[in-house]
């Protein structure tokens, strides 16, 4: 299937070499680190990335961040989606499932990470209802898949507890590097309400053996709310001291 | 290529008939493509397909053995996995009102994704292997698929006992076995879905229900289950 070619033609974005065959990109991906990314652009640690975001927060956003507890206020802790930004770090694994006019990216585990869909056959709809994952559309620029995402709600956080607004605009440039062994995600966050300027970082992912999903039993079917009673006890233990401390600080 | 495949699919379905020997296919073939990529939504019980087919039966019509009936009576319906944002399992989920699915291929597997992720999750149907012999029981079990003509036949075993069989609290055992038969009908406009449940511990007899899923133009939307802490 030449799905990439179809998508590129539909968008009228064919460069000289033409878009790659997206079917080759299909697979189960995990984050690449260390030696695997040597010679490529530097990959920031989560703390470095957090600093990058914090340095650009508008004053109100900084205040909001400082009054937020990253455990108590983390949507993922109550099995709500964590937003598409934390997935890279907190989850770091996804399926890349290309179709003729869309790419489906279930992050593992679902839930709470959720499923992204990148539509290759349309622009953003007008009057988008804000959602956790926003609305993503893709087009080819040469061998790079450029994904434009808007329409996020403001319930998720950029890295840990760095706020964003519904104005958040994310652009990802995705291409194969290192002879096709890695997918490079060049990601730019823009939010004129919450950030003083855009920031950019890069992540790399490698294909993993699908049999790993069998070997690591249950990964595909993780249930966030596996045991509500046990979970509540754990949350009480974890959250009560944090909430108490938070009250004292305030 | 999608368009030619769809045309071939239609020709196969029209000329070959849905169960004819000529329609022997592989997962990579035209008929297989008719179930892939698109969004399908279950039809309502008061609807019928363009060809007049209607849903038959449903999880609430299963017949339980006496001990299972007694067990069901003791179930607290407030603990329904529906209310806890937990998976319902394929038997109950595929009959759920307004259920939407999309099926994507991936290297010998078919990934079935539910719009209602919390209750449906995402199933991997393995067409490239048999059942695992050493897997732990899971909410969705272990599904293996094979093609019989134009029909995808999925056998699922290895369930844990956390899901319910229906809205009334009917439980099942670890011996639950599902056989699902999925095939495109009416030119690919619908999927016929029939599931048979076997569980010698709780079911009086094997039970089969049928649902028709309509291909829709719409997209899968974000459906987030808002969990409320138990009192």
Image: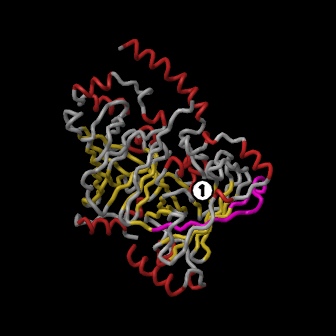
- In this rendering, is residue B54 above or below B59? below
- The colour scheme applied to this rendered structure is secondary structure
Who is closer to the viewer here, A225 or A172?
A: A225
Question: How many numbered discs sit on the rendered protein?
Answer: 1
Residue A22 image-quadrant placement: bottom left
Q: In this view, does B204 lie to the left or right of A84?
A: right
Residue tagged 1: B90
For label 1, the SS is: helix
Residue B100: x and y in percent read 47, 59
Residue at image coords 43%, 35%: A75
Residue at image coords 61%, 40%: B79
- In the orientation shown, which residue stands out farthest toward the front? B46
Who is closer to the viewer here, B185 or B63?
A: B63
- In this rendering, is residue A52 above or below B28? above
Residue at image coords 69%, 60%: B197
Q: Give the range drawn in magenta.
A: B197-214
Q: In this view, does A50 lie to the left or right of B187?
A: left
Q: Quadrant of the N terminus of chain A?
A: bottom left
Return the chain for callout 1: B
Residue B206: x and y in percent read 73, 63
Residue count near mark 1 (Cα–Cα under 10 Å), binned few <14, some 14–19, many ≥20:
many
């Amino acid at each position: 299937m030449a799905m990439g070619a179809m998508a590129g033609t539909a968008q009228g974005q064919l460069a000289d070499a033409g878009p790659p065959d997206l079917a080759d990109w299909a697979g189960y991906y995990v984050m690449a680190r260390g030696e695997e990314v040597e010679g490529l652009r530097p990959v920031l640690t989560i703390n470095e990335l957090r600093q990058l975001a914090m340095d650009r927060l508008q004053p109100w956003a900084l205040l909001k961040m400082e009054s937020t507890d990253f455990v108590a206020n983390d949507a993922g802790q109550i099995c709500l989606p964590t937003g598409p930004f934390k997935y890279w770090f907190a989850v770091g694994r996804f399926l890349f499932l290309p179709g003729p006019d869309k790419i489906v990216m279930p992050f593992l585990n679902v839930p709470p990470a959720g499923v992204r869909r990148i539509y290759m056959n349309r622009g953003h709809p007008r009057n988008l209802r804000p959602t956790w994952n926003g609305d993503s559309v893709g087009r080819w620029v040469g061998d790079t898949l450029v994904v434009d995402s808007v329409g996020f709600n403001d319930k998720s956080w950029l890295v840990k507890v760095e706020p964003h607004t519904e104005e958040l605009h994310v652009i990802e440039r995705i291409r194969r590097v290192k002879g096709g062994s890695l997918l490079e995600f060049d990601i730019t966050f823009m939010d004129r309400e919450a950030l003083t300027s855009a920031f950019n970082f890069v992540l790399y992912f490698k294909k993993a053996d699908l049999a790993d999903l069998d070997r690591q039993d249950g990964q595909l079917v993780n249930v966030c709310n596996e045991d509500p009673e046990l979970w509540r006890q754990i949350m009480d233990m974890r959250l009560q001291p944090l909430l108490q401390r938070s009250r004292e600080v305030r | 290529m999608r368009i030619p495949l769809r045309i071939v699919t239609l020709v196969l379905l029209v000329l070959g008939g849905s169960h004819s020997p000529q329609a022997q296919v592989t997962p990579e073939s035209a008929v297989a493509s008719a179930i892939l990529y698109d969004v399908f939504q279950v039809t309502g019980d008061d609807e019928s397909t363009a060809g007049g087919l209607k849903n038959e039966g449903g999880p609430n019509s299963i017949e339980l053995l006496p001990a299972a009936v007694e067990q069901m009576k003791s179930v607290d319906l407030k603990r329904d996995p529906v209310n806890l944002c937990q998976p319902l399992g394929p038997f109950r989920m595929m009959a759920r009102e307004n259920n939407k699915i999309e099926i994507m291929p991936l290297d010998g597997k078919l990934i079935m994704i539910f719009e209602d992720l919390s209750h449906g999750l995402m199933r991997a149907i393995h067409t490239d292997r048999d059942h695992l012999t050493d897997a732990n029981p899971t909410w969705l079990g272990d599904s293996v698929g094979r093609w019989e003509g134009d029909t995808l036949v999925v056998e699922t075993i290895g369930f844990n006992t956390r899901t319910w069989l229906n809205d009334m609290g009917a439980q099942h055992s670890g011996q639950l076995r599902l056989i699902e038969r999925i095939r495109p009908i009416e030119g690919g406009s619908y999927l016929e879905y029939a599931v048979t449940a076997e569980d010698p511990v709780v079911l009086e007899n094997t039970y089969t229900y049928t649902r028709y899923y309509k291909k829709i133009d719409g997209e899968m939307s974000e459906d987030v289950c808002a969990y409320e802490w138990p009192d």
